[in-house]
Image (cartoon, rainbow, N blue to C red):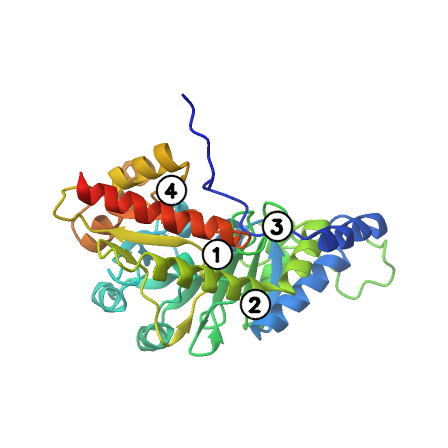
Amino acid sequence: MSVKIKLDFPRIQTKLTSDEISRLNVALQEAQTLSMGPYLQEFENDFSKYLSVKHAFGVSNASSALEIATMLSGVVQGDEVIVPAHTFTASALPFLRLKAKIVFADIDPKTFVMDISDIRKKITPRTKAIVVVHLYGLPVQMDELMKMSLEHGLIIIEDCAQAPGANWQGKKVGTFGDFGCFSFHGQKNITTLGEGGMIVTNNDNYAETILGLRKIGQRPFVNQQKYWQPAMSNIVEAAPGLIPYNFALGEIQAKAGTILLERLDKINEKRRASFEKIVSGLSSHGELRFQAQSQNSVSAMHLLPARFCTSNSGKTRDDLIDMLYNEYGIKCAVQYCPLYRYELFQKNGYFDTGTCPESNAFFDSMISFPFGTDLSDDDIDYLISSADEALNKLQEN
């Protein structure tokens, strides 16, 4: 007998309204080009203003943004790069390709994001960069991390894929380090119609190089007298030894990003209110521990993860997921396997050496509930009442 799903996972996080769809239709009808045009420029300008950062470049996805940041970081084979063990694989793949040495950082068991004290322990003279992942929308402690970067001369790449609009001490994430990388995938807080990303920087030299890398090296000829002579555009080596890619973001995708960016703060506010309601509604269940929020930060509240602490009943996280799915039609997930437990990383020499015990413990006990901007009040009430009932049943059995 198939299960009737009432709350699915994953889900489109934020859907366009009918008015926003109408605006997108107008843009599609009026567009003079569908790539590298005025809608992209508009989105980039609006995004840089929103973050208060000098340069923003739309790209095909956050993975592309991370690839570009990696190419510009100066990291070469043999250099060490610190990456959280508990993150989406895209945070580490560019450095795996480079054959740099990835050093895995553990997470804080309360916040589920990178543990600053563990990062400090793992910096060596060979460390070249740190990939800072604001996982689940919650910022890492950026003041302490930036002090470390200055002390040791490290490149900081912020992976903000899940954290657009989040801030640390009033400053938006993505603007602290050398690069900020954002995602507009359909499962993120705002989307550019399924795929899309942005790389931002305050460094003028990086910005000029990104322009060459992003779109197959197309840059204007120097002192070009006529637009068609010697050709429409030059093809350049963006930086010594770097062959350009094509990471372009389409025009209509960019327009969708501009439209949703207008209400990003309201989207995040609604998500925080939903988070607080759910956490409050399940507060009587001590075995369920949600992500701790720092007083110094404002989260983008991308997902709804919690740690299930096995109680006297002996029931586990898996028992809860199974019951919610089969009895209530609520599909939950287990996310972000520590990277060294994946086959790909093990084939490249990375194994569990016991240096990230909190990442292992959290992954083995975590549950991620269905969550999204467009969850209705009825959806939230159903999630709370169902989880409450299921947790009570597990205690009784």
Contact? badges 2 and 1 (CB < 8 Å): no
Mark 1 neighbour class, 10 Å CA radius: few under 14, some 14 to 19, many 20 or more: many
- Residue at the extreme top: 1
Helix, strand or loop status at disc 1? loop
Number of numbered discs: 4
Which residue of the protein is positioned furthest toward the left in this rendering? 312
Give the residue type that dot 3 points to. Answer: Lys
Residues at circles 3 and 2 in contact by the CB criterion of under 8 Å: no
Q: Which comes sooner in the sequence, label 2 or label 1? A: 1
Image quadrant in which you'd find residue 169? bottom left
Calculate the distance from the C-alpha at mark 2 to the C-alpha at mark 1. 16 Å
Q: Amino acid at mark 2?
A: Asp
* Closer to the camera in the image, 337 or 299: 299
Q: Which residue is label 1 attached to?
A: 161
Is 200 positioned to the left or the right of 318 in the image? right
Q: Residue at x 60, y 73 (%)?
A: 54
Q: Residue 332: which disc?
A: 4
Q: Percent from the top left, x then y, of residue 353? A: 17, 48
Quickly name the residue at label 3: 15
